[in-house]
Amino acid sequence: MTSKAFKVSHTDAEWRARLTPEQYDVLRGHGTERPGSCALNHEKRRGVFRCVGCGQDLFRSGEKFDSGTGWPSFFEPLPDAIETSRDASHFMIRTEVHCSQCGGHLGHVFDDGPPPTHLRYCINGVALDFHPD
């Protein structure tokens, strides 16, 4: 996704200045936080989860569920909030999830989620910022 021009873009130095090292590693370096390490995995209040890189609304709390994986999981994103790409790293094929506004890596989507979509958007909590209603 690096060749696409996004609505929100910064130089590498600007991203490093705006984000914590862990946020930078995930959003810009396609890293993964340690499972169970983020308090947002346990967030139960009503509200919206936003991209920590650009502030775009990504997921409503009503679409969040406990997948038991150690990462916040959602069965549906907000319309036009995310984009996907093929990820062939780590000797497997997965579908990577990116913020549609800044291109930041959020996590991956799998087809083992609950109804009605049967999708599991497995998202790094460090890539999110929660705003209660």
Image: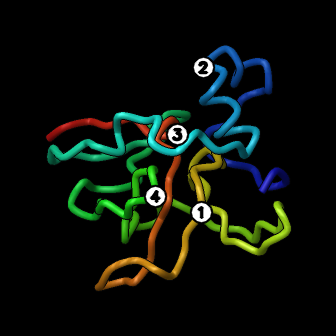
Image side of residue 44 versus residue 116, left or right: left
Residue designated by label 2: 20
Circle 4: residue type = Thr
State which quarter of the image contains the N terminus. Answer: bottom right
Mark 4: give few (<14), some (14-19) or many (20+) Cα within 10 Å.
few
Q: Are marks 1 and 3 in contact (CB under 8 Å)?
A: no
| Cα–Cα span, label 4 and label 1 | 12 Å
Circle 2: residue type = Thr
The one nearer the camera, 3 or 125, is 125
Of badges 4 and 1, nearer the viewer stands: 4
| Cα–Cα span, label 3 and label 4 | 16 Å
The one nearer the camera, 106 or 78, is 106
Circle 1: residue type = His
Residue designated by label 4: 69
Which element type, helix, strand or loop, lies under badge 3?
helix
Q: Residue at x 59, y 63 (%)?
A: 108
Residue designated by label 3: 127
The one nearer the camera, 116 or 113, is 113
Q: Residue at x 62, y 39 (%)?
A: 8
The one nearer the camera, 51 or 92, is 92
Q: Which mark is residue 108?
A: 1
Could you tell which of marks 4 and 2 lies nearer the N-terminus? Answer: 2
Could you tell which of marks 1 and 3 lies nearer the N-terminus? Answer: 1
Please tell me whether residue 84 is drawn above or below residue 50 in the rendered image: below
Of badges 3 and 4, nearer the viewer stands: 4
Q: Position of residue 65 (x, y in %)?
A: 29, 62
Q: Position of residue 123 (x, y in %)?
A: 50, 53
State which quarter of the image contains the C terminus. Answer: top left
Q: How is the image coloured?
A: rainbow
| Cα–Cα span, label 1 and label 3 | 12 Å
